[in-house]
Amino acid sequence: MTSELRTQRLRIREWAPDDAPAALRIYGVEKVAARLTPEMSTVGDEEAMRSVLQAWIEAQPNLVTPAGRWAVVRESDGEVIGGLALRQLPPYEEDFELSWHLRPDAWGSGYASEAARALAGWAFEQGLEELFAVARPDNERAAATARRIGMEWVGETDKYYGATLQVFRMRPSDLEGAVPAGFTEN
């Protein structure tokens, strides 16, 4: 994504190294990290977070479109409140995963659904025919968000990440009418 995506309340943009303190309030929190894919754990400090962000930033140009990682910024105060990712799922890198991560004080406000719908819409405009979300079986919050954005539960598998995960799928027709009014690409 060369430009930002905007919704009524959010801006989705590329990460910057200076986002490290805000990103640490997401990826440095155990109750957030415990829900992430098995290959990512809690980030310990700001320096480590800056290194993670730098790796994401450097990898971005080499990823298959529409893959990437982005910051979610609340328009009302300019705060980075979360992150989004579109990535190819292991082990075969055939399926694209849509994931969302918010800092705990932003939970329950509809931000995850709003941001995920916007990014899914953009991904479908890039030619993707389907997106998947995976969640640990006890992650009811992620499952509810997946359903809210129009994804349907398709089963449980240990195909991805070597862990038993719930799988949700979305196709472009599942998104119709779900993108919030006021969504624009700048």
Image (cartoon, rainbow, N blue to C red):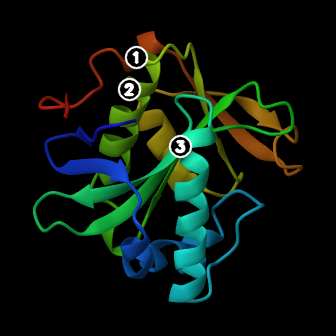
Identify residue type, mark 1: Glu
Could you tell me the amino acid type at mark 3?
Answer: Gly
Sequence-first tag of 3 and 2:
3
Give above or below for 176 relative to 132.
above
Q: Name the residue under label 1.
A: 125
User: SS for tag 1?
Assistant: helix
Instruction: Please count the marks in the image.
Output: 3
Which of 51/24 is in front? 51
Query: What's the residue at 44%, 57% (across, down)?
Result: 83
Q: Answer left or right for 11 relative to 159.
A: left
**How many neighbours does mark 1 have within 10 angstroms: few (below 14), some (14-19), or many (20 or more)?**
few
Residue 17: x percent and y percent?
Answer: 43, 71
- Residue drawn at (63%, 63%) of the image: 35
Question: In the depicted view, which residue is nearer to us: 76 or 114?
Answer: 76
Separation of disc 3 and disc 2 at Cα?
A: 12 Å
Q: Are marks 2 and 1 in contact (CB under 8 Å)?
A: yes
Nearest to N terminus: mark 3 or mark 1? 3
Q: Which residue position is annotated with label 2?
A: 122
In the displayed structure, 66 sits above or below 41; it is above
Task: Please tell me which residue lies in front, 2 or 135.
Answer: 2
Residues at marks 2 and 1, CA–CA distance in whole angstroms: 5 Å
Determine which quarter of the picture holds residue 118: top left
Whether residue 92 is visible, yes or no, is yes
Q: Mark 3 points at which residue?
A: 68
In the image, what residue type sits under mark 2?
Trp
Image coords of residue 50 (percent x, y): 52, 77
Residue 37 figure quarter: bottom right
Judging from the image, what secondary structure is the residue with disc 3 in?
strand
